[in-house]
Image (cartoon, rainbow, N blue to C red):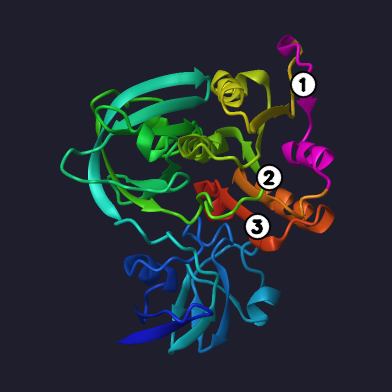
Amino acid sequence: MTFTIALQPSGRAFDVARDEPILTAAIREGIGLPYGCKDGACGSCKSRLLEGRVIHGAHQQKALSEAEEAAGLILTCCATPQTDCVVEARSVPGAGQFAILKMPGRVLSMAQPAPDVKVIRVQLPANQNFQYHPGQYIEFILRDGARRSYSMANAPHQLGTPPSIELHIRHMPGGKFTDQVFGAMKEKDILRMEGPFGSFFLREESTKPMVLLASGTGLAPIKALIERLEELASAREAVLYWGARSKADLYLNDWAEAAAARLPNLRYVPVLSEPRPEDSWTGRTGFVHHAVMADLPDLSGHQVYACGAPIMVESAQRDFEAKCGLPDDEFFADSFTSEADKHGA
């Protein structure tokens, strides 16, 4: 049995199986809906059910509260239709533009710029034309079928020879995948992966100045966005705020400084939350989104692209909209939800 989902205001419609999440069907049909984690943890896919009935699978209260659900809001990533439905959802042009491919990748190189961060490059298969928007992510498929998501840190024009994607992986002790990356993984290993996924990428039609906000390895998709801005020779003003605990955690600080020196419209502001005495740090300190608010108290004319820990993304969105006048439809985020986040641990 299938049900029809009609989207407003776009007028698009597609069929969904009875026990299939709405988002899964939309991705399959190449229909651009907003989403992030696909696991009911980040809330990026929140939409409004105008007509019909759905059942929600497991999800985080912070992604969709009982009050929001009672008010007609749904998470398309874990809402399965029980009838035909009409859903009000923002259309994301380009989100379904590229084919989602399952493919093998070969570990081309591994570097460790910080004690708990590895930068790996994974070679793409020569017989498949993998395309993506800077900011999107791929999923590694593990032996037991579990999946782990990582954003491409290089823009497509920076794939290199042989073509490879760059990924920034932070070690999560006890993590099924990151223990492997920081342990047994070596060059030439073969990984199974699928993508591209995600609705986080540059809205190139806009001319608004941008805040690029990253914490930790949230720099990865932001780096890809900056490379895309450079490729476009964009005249848009942009400022990169990168938050980390200590100086050692600014694992690509040299890259960020060089990008800001090279791009006339890009500024770079690193912010440390827990600088160590040996850092001899004279730069900004505290919460990274507070640094943005101190510098840019009026964000009403800006776009914000935020990536990193869920608490940073949630705090930034709340405070930027409530205190700095940022329009809610100009905040774009990729919340790096861990498996612990997804399961409420």
In the image, residue 286 lies at what x, y percent? Answer: 79, 32
Q: Is residue 310 visible?
A: no
The local secondary structure at tag 3 comes to: helix
Q: Residues within 10 Å of mark 3 (few under 14, many from 20)?
A: some
Q: Is residue 292 magenta?
A: yes
Residue type of the residue flagged with mark 1: Gly
The answer to whether 26 appears left or right of 237 in the picture is left
Residue type of the residue flagged with mark 2: Met
Give the residue at the far left of this rendering: 127
The answer to whether 194 appears left or right of 167 in the picture is left
Which span is picked out in magenta? 278-297
Q: CA distance from mark 2 to mark 1?
A: 20 Å
Q: CA distance from mark 3 to mark 1?
A: 28 Å
Which comes sooner in the sequence, label 2 or label 3? Answer: 2
Q: CA distance from mark 2 to mark 3?
A: 17 Å
Residue type of the residue flagged with mark 3: Glu
Q: Which mark is residue 80?
A: none
* Residue where numbered disc 2 is placed: 312
Check contact, mark 2 vs mark 3: CB within 8 A. no
The local secondary structure at tag 2 comes to: helix
The local secondary structure at tag 1 comes to: loop
300 to 193, vertically: above or below: below
Instruction: Count the numbered circles shown.
Output: 3
In the image, residue 297 lies at what x, y percent? Answer: 83, 46
* Residue where numbered disc 1 is placed: 283
Which comes sooner in the sequence, label 3 or label 1? Answer: 1
* Residue where numbered disc 3 is placed: 330
In the image, residue 266 lies at what x, y percent? Answer: 63, 32
177 or 319, which is in the foreground? 319
Q: Residues within 10 Å of mark 2 (few under 14, many from 20)?
A: many
